[in-house]
Image (tube, rainbow, N blue to C red):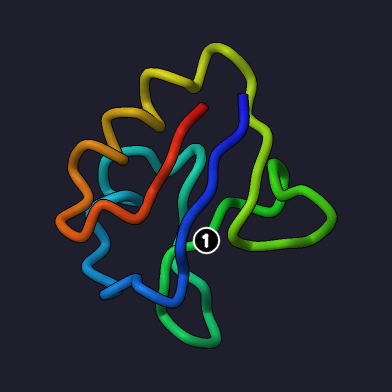
Amino acid sequence: MKVTINRDECIACGACWSDCDAVFEENPDDGNSQIVAKYQVGGNPAEGEIPDDLVDCAKAAADGCPVEIIKVG
């Protein structure tokens, strides 16, 4: 399933990688959220394809994002 992050709007609060570190992590260069490399599409830290068993985890992280910049599906 597709997951995207609007990294320009990210406030680097860490909620998503706290809720679902299998899909999200902190970017070491800017501190913003990114998709873990394993699931990135074309090396894009803002776009990923995740397996079905991580969809609930990613949705929980999206729901917990205070600025609502994560989309799953």
Figure check: 32 above or below 64:
below
Graded by Cα atoms within 10 Å as few (under 14), some (14 to 19) or many (20 or more), the crowding at tag 1 reads many
Specify the quadrant that holds the N terminus.
top right
- Measured as percent of width and height from the top left, residue 57 is found at 37, 26
- As drawn, the residue found furthest toward the top would be 53
* Residue 14 percent across, percent down from the top left: 27, 62
Above/below status of 68 relative to 29: above
Amino acid type of the residue tagged 1 in the rendering: Gln
Q: Is 9 displayed left or right of 63 in the figure?
A: right
Give left or right: position of 40 versus 58.
right
- Front residue of 5/52: it is 5
The number of discs equals 1
- List the residue tagged with mark 1: 34
Q: Is residue 21 above or below residue 58?
A: below
Task: Residue at 35% x, 73% y: name it.
Answer: 9
24 horizontally vs 63: left or right: right
Q: Quadrant of residue 61?
A: top left
* Image side of residue 28 versus residue 71, left or right: right
* Residue 29: image location, x then y, percent: 55, 86
Return the residue nearer the eye: 62 or 37: 62
Query: Circle 1 sits in a helix, a strand or a loop, which is it?
Result: strand
Query: Which residue lies at the image location 30% right of the left edge and 73% below the top edge?
Result: 12
Q: Residue furthest right?
A: 42
Above or below, comparing residue 21 to residue 28 in the picture: above
In the current view of this chain or complex, which residue is farthest to the bottom?
29
Q: Residue at x 39, y 48 (%)?
A: 70
Residue 49: x, y in percent? 68, 34
